[in-house]
Amino acid sequence: MSEEEALRGLRMTMKTDSPANQTAAIVLEPVLGEGGFYAAPTSFLKELRNICDENGILLIVDEVQSGFGRTGKMFAIEHSGVEADIITMAKSMADGMPISAIVGTDKHMDSSGPNSLGGTYTGSPTACAAALAVFDVFKEEDILGKSVRLGEKLNQRFTQWQEQFSHVDNVRTLGPMAAFEFVESKDNHKPMPELAAAVTKKAKEKGLILLSCGMYGNSLRFLMPVTIEDNILEEGLAIVEECLKEVGA
């Protein structure tokens, strides 16, 4: 589905199934996680912002997986210049400690009243200390700069694989939030989830854990730590390349 078709479908849905005056919010991931690491186009996000503004609808962005430097910026939505009304976050926020957060404009966050917001991890002093430490590390160690450089390395390597291997296609990276697909051929783009499964199995035998994703299960996604050492990164990429050669053959 093209970007234009998606927007037309959304506007039609708001006329037929979910009228604007009965729609409280639109929630989306700026980069799909389990959906295959597809980044929403900037023009799509801007038009979505316009639709929300025209109809008094909140735009809520889920940055649980894409936030905190995963795409080269603190939050993936920043790449588009679009401002969300509310952002949800967790995971990298405290370097793996159990914590999550909801951040929004004062207009919306103050409207729910005292003691109306809560959660399972609320009030954990250890997790809160970890989150504060993460902010310090971001500043002191230039984590966003490291993220950008890591994304460039992955894009270069994935592009080489796309040229080298006939079944590797549709390389996509937004910073180090990176993925590529296995297809029958670059002409028909027919998904090959069985090849993705074979590569992940072969990689596990070699000591590397990979995860497939996407609607058809034919995409391999990469979510190594942004702070990964160069030698560890190269070791992992070398294993993937070995698997591509062995399984592809």
Image (cartoon, helix red, strand yellow):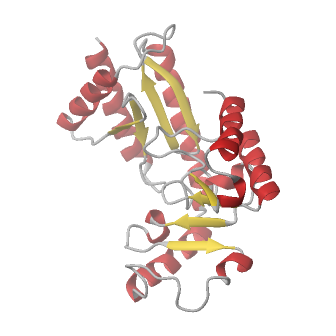
Tell which residue pokes out farthest to the left in this image: 205
**Residue at x-position 71% and y-position 34%:** 8
**Residue at x-position 68% and y-position 52%:** 19
User: Residue 125: x, y in percent?
Assistant: 41, 88
User: Residue 91: x, y in percent?
Assistant: 43, 64
User: Residue 49: x, y in percent?
Assistant: 75, 53
Which of 59 and 41 lies nearest the eye of the viewer? Answer: 59
Q: Quadrant of the C terminus?
A: top left
Tell which residue pokes out farthest to the top in this image: 187
Tell which residue pokes out farthest to the front in this image: 16
Does residue 241 appear left or right of residue 72 in this picture?
left
Name the quadrant containing residue 119. Answer: bottom left
Which of 139 and 194 lies nearest the eye of the viewer? Answer: 194
User: Residue 110: x, y in percent?
Assistant: 67, 84
Which of 229 and 218 lies nearest the eye of the viewer? Answer: 218
Which of 76 and 18 lies nearest the eye of the viewer? Answer: 18
* 151 shown above or below 83: above
* 87 shown above or below 145: below
The number of discs equals 0
**Residue at x-position 51% and y-position 15%:** 163
Name the quadrant containing residue 209. Answer: top left
Name the quadrant containing residue 109. Answer: bottom right
Q: Quadrant of the N terminus?
A: top right
